[in-house]
Structure formats: structure tokens, C-alpha cells
Image: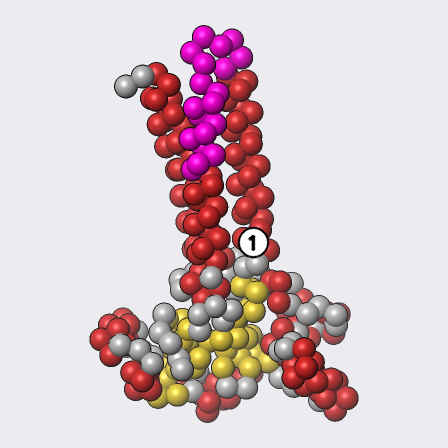
């Protein structure tokens, strides 16, 4: 194996390791399974990974000069180019991350950072003014007690597609809507209508404490939220099953 090829393989291995660390962090913190699939972000991550690997190979082949005096300088510059690309990519993924899982009427809605309507953010409870920098949090949604504002929210939803679940000023602690969660939840047997029965059984066997479910409405693929109705509507897990 030539020195140039050895260097390229080493450079690619380092770039791949860094990429794997970044993807693991994104996957475990911002998009816990199966939210990556629900938001469709896995395609973006695949593109970022392919471009990053291609960039690593191209730069490694381009900068290697065994006798070049400023080889180290070229290597540092190439590493910075890759780092800048990776940081921009991470920032883009961060900006579109899911931030709230909001219970609204008869379902949960997955709210992305870019979905938030912050026109009345000052009216929101302090707990909901700023979303978590890490995993999305569960909240409840309640209609305004003011008739005019309630009608305005309904108008925006019907004509502009802006769900009340996108408005932080309407958020309440999830415990406050636990009775609604339980009352609106559905029997687990209904999941067999929309999924392979063996898949349903496999997933439910992993979550024996779950006894009811609610849909999770997402951007790309709707998921299922398993709950324990015997324990104040406690959310057990979001699973990769179709809810309708």
C-alpha cells in the first residue's frame, strides 16, 4: 500500500470516527428513537454523512505530498474545512430538532423548533418559553379562556394550518391533562388494524406496563405513544407503529 493510500485511509478513518460520535449525539439527545424517522431527518443525516466522507477522501488525496514542506499546514486547513462543514450541518439539524411533544385534544403532536409560533411568547409560562436544548419534553395544550383569542386560534388552525400545539402560551404541564389523556386513549388491539400483528406483539412485549395508546402526529411518519392508564396516563414510550 502506497504512503498516499495509507494516509487517505487514516484520514478517512478519523473523519468517520468523528462523524459517528456526532451522529450518536444527535440520535440519542435531539432525536431519540423513533423521532428521526418521524421527522424524516434520517435522510438529511445520510446526506451529511456521505458528503462528509466524500470530502474527507477528496481532501486526503489532494493534500498529500510526501516531500511538501507545508504538508502539515495543508492538513490543518483541510481539517478546518471539514470541521466547518460539520458544524454548519450540526447547527442545521439542531435548528429543526423536535422540542415539544404536545398533547392536543385526542393526540400528541411532535413540534419542531421551526414550528413554534412565538408571537405571544411573553404570555407563556416561564417553563415553556424556552425549549430544552436536549430531548423534546411532554406538555399539555389547553384552549384560552378568552373567547376572542380562542376563536382567533381556531381561525388560524382552519385557514393557515397553525395548530394550537405550536403556541407555547397555550402549554400546561402534562400532568394537568392526564385525565384527558386517559379518556381519549385507545385500546392496544386497534394497533393490529394498521400494523403487522407480529410487529405489534414484539413491541408490546417490550413494554408490558403499557395498556393504552394515543397517536403521535409527526411531519413525515406518524408514530404511537404507549401509555399506562392505571398510572395517571404515564407515557411509557414512543414506538414505531402506525396509530391509524
Determine which residue is flagged by label 1: 94
Image quadrant where one finds the C terminus: bottom left
Residue at image x 55%, y 32%?
A: 81
Question: Can residue 205 be seen at all in this image of the molecule?
Answer: no
Residue at image x 36%, y 70%?
A: 240
Above or below 59: residue 95? below
Asked if residue 215 lies in the magenta stretch, the reply is: no
Image quadrant where one finds the N terminus: top left
- Magenta stretch bounds: 53-71
Decide whether the magenta segment is chiefly helix, strand or loop.
helix
Q: Position of residue 185 (x, y in %)?
A: 43, 87
Give the crowd class for mark 1: few <14, some 14-19, many >=20 residues within 10 Å: some
Asked if residue 57 lies in the magenta stretch, the reply is: yes
Which residue is the extreme one toward the right? 148
**177 sits left or right of 206 in the view:** right
Report which quarter residue 77 is drawn in.
top right
**164 sits left or right of 108 in the view:** right
Question: Can residue 67 be seen at all in this image of the molecule?
Answer: yes
Front residue of 147/86: it is 86
What's the image's color scheme? secondary structure
Residue at image x 65%, y 81%?
A: 157
Above or below 133: residue 121? below
Above or below 163: residue 113? above
Front residue of 28/42: it is 42
Front residue of 36/181: it is 36
Above or below 48: residue 41? below
Which residue is the extreme one toward the left? 198
Q: Position of residue 122 (x, y in %)?
A: 75, 70
Q: Position of residue 139 (x, y in %)?
A: 55, 74
Q: Position of residue 148 (x, y in %)?
A: 77, 88
Describe the element under mark 1 as helix, strand or loop: helix
Residue at image x 59%, y 55%?
A: 95
Amino acid at each position: 500500500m502506497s504512503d498516499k493510500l495509507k494516509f487517505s485511509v487514516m484520514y478517512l478513518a478519523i473523519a468517520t470516527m468523528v462523524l459517528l460520535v456526532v451522529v450518536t449525539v444527535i440520535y440519542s439527545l435531539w432525536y431519540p428513537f423513533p423521532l428521526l424517522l418521524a421527522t424524516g431527518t434520517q435522510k438529511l443525516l445520510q446526506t451529511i454523512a456521505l458528503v462528509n466522507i466524500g470530502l474527507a477522501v477528496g481532501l486526503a488525496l489532494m493534500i498529500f505530498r510526501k516531500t511538501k514542506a507545508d504538508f502539515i499546514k495543508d492538513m490543518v486547513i483541510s481539517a478546518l474545512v471539514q470541521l466547518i462543514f460539520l458544524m454548519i450541518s450540526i447547527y442545521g439539524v439542531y435548528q429543526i430538532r423536535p422540542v415539544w411533544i404536545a398533547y392536543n385534544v385526542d393526540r400528541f403532536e411532535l413540534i419542531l423548533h421551526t414550528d413554534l409560533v412565538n408571537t405571544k411568547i411573553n404570555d407563556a409560562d416561564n417553563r415553556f418559553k424556552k425549549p430544552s436544548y436536549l430531548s423534546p419534553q411532554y406538555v399539555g395544550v389547553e384552549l384560552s379562556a378568552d373567547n376572542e383569542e380562542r376563536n382567533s386560534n381556531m381561525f388560524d388552525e382552519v385557514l393557515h394550518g397553525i395548530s394550537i400545539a405550536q403556541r407555547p402560551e397555550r402549554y400546561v404541564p402534562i400532568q394537568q391533562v392526564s385525565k384527558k389523556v386517559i379518556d381519549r386513549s385507545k385500546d392496544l388491539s386497534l394497533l393490529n388494524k394498521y400494523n403487522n400483528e407480529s410487529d405489534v406483539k414484539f413491541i408490546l412485549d417490550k413494554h408490558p406496563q403499557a395498556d393504552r395508546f394515543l397517536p403521535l402526529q409527526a411531519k413525515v411518519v406518524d408514530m404511537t405513544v404507549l401509555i399506562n392508564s392505571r398510572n395517571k396516563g404515564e407515557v411509557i414510550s414512543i414506538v414505531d407503529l402506525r396509530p391509524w
